[in-house]
Amino acid sequence: MSVVRHGDRIDLAHVIRMPGKRPEIRLCESFRVEKNEADALFRLGQSRGLRRYRCAALLDENEYRLVQLEAPSVPPEERVQALRWRLKDVVDFSVDGAAIDVVDIPTEGGRQASVFAVVAPATVIGERMALFHEKKVPLEVIDIPEMAVRNVAVLFEEANRGLAFLALTQGDGLLTITYRGELYLSRRIEIASDALAQADDERRGQMLERLALELQRTLDNFDRQYGFISVSRLLVASEFDCAGTTAALGQNLYLPVQAADLGAVLEFAALPELRSAERQAQSLLAIGAALRIDA
């Protein structure tokens, strides 16, 4: 069960994986935070029986940094410490005692190996763990939005082809590129679904043109950096007018642009509200967090 704070609401998603079948979303609900997160978590723990689940939470984008670095040439058990020294000059908080995780970026040929380093202040992790513990909600995983989007994107991948996935929610837009189930690129883009919703037609058109230009530049740069990966298409999940946003981007990009329909890769027959593309986008991070497979 994922328990994801998103602005003034908490999203819950429960996903079941069965061998040989598509993952099934058993529950997907959103709740307004009336007083504070602690109160909401306590109430949800009681009303939704969260004690029965293995729960996953996501950090907010302001609570961590995701940094791409050259893979350190040290034994696996020494990688975190080696990266800690490098991160001192990269992040704007102390890395002494910070929580650090490492995600490999596979490569081919003689290319220099790279990694994603995820770093968060120890206080951020400690406070999140203490909150769940106090409310007696079993927290097993603290993840990040980039990996949640990755978990959804890989379900849409075509064999031996890369996939670009754009998530437009209330915060910044998030673009990922995955290949063979691995995350190769993650980029925050300063445009959000609520900004599109509030703009008039002319302003919205300008925003989408600028977004398309940013996407094209990123895709071109990715092609130069990872020439062995052919990106087949861009999927779009947007909380506002997903069809219109997808069509506008498709007119300005060289690769196919399609709306991400979770119904093509996930089962949710008991949740008819998820047939809406906008509701799918609203719940995307929670669904992605619940799709996590522990190594």
Image: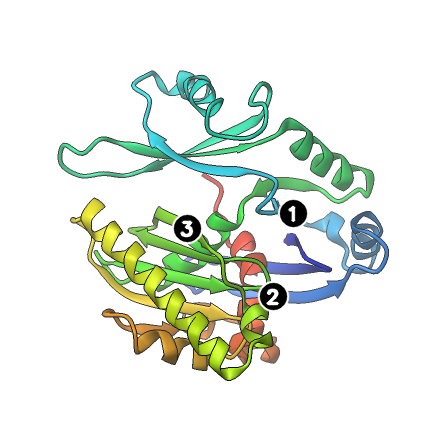
Front tag of 3 and 1? 3
Label whose residue precedes the other's in the sequence (1 or 2): 2
Label whose residue precedes the other's in the sequence (2 or 3): 2
In the rendered view, tell whether residue 292 sits above or below residue 161: above
**Marks 3 and 2: in contact by CB < 8 Å?**
no
Image location (x, y in percent) of residue 4: 65, 53
Residue 41 appears left or right of 86: right
Image location (x, y in percent) of residue 44: 79, 56
In which quarter of the view is residue 16 placed? bottom right
Residue holding disc 1: 55
Image location (x, y in percent) of residue 85: 45, 18
Residue 127 appears left or right of 275: right
Q: Say what secondary structure mark 1 lies in.
A: strand
Q: Say what secondary structure mark 2 lies in.
A: strand
User: Which mark, by number, is residue 187?
Assistant: 3
In the rendered view, tell whether residue 39 sits above or below residue 210: above
Within 10 angstroms of label 1, few (less than 14), some, or many (20 or more) residues?
A: many
Query: Of all residues shown, which one is farthest toward the left?
Result: 109
Residue 18 appears left or right of 1: left
**Marks 2 and 1: in contact by CB < 8 Å?**
no
Q: What residue lies at 23% left-to-right and 70% top-to-bottom? A: 254
Residue holding disc 2: 26
Count every numbered label the image shows and give the total.
3
Q: CA distance from mark 2 to mark 3?
A: 30 Å
Q: Which residue type does callout 3 highlight?
A: Arg
Image location (x, y in percent) of residue 147: 47, 48
Q: CA distance from mark 1 to mark 2?
A: 14 Å
Q: Say what secondary structure mark 3 lies in.
A: strand
Asked whether the viewer can see residue 20, the reply is: no
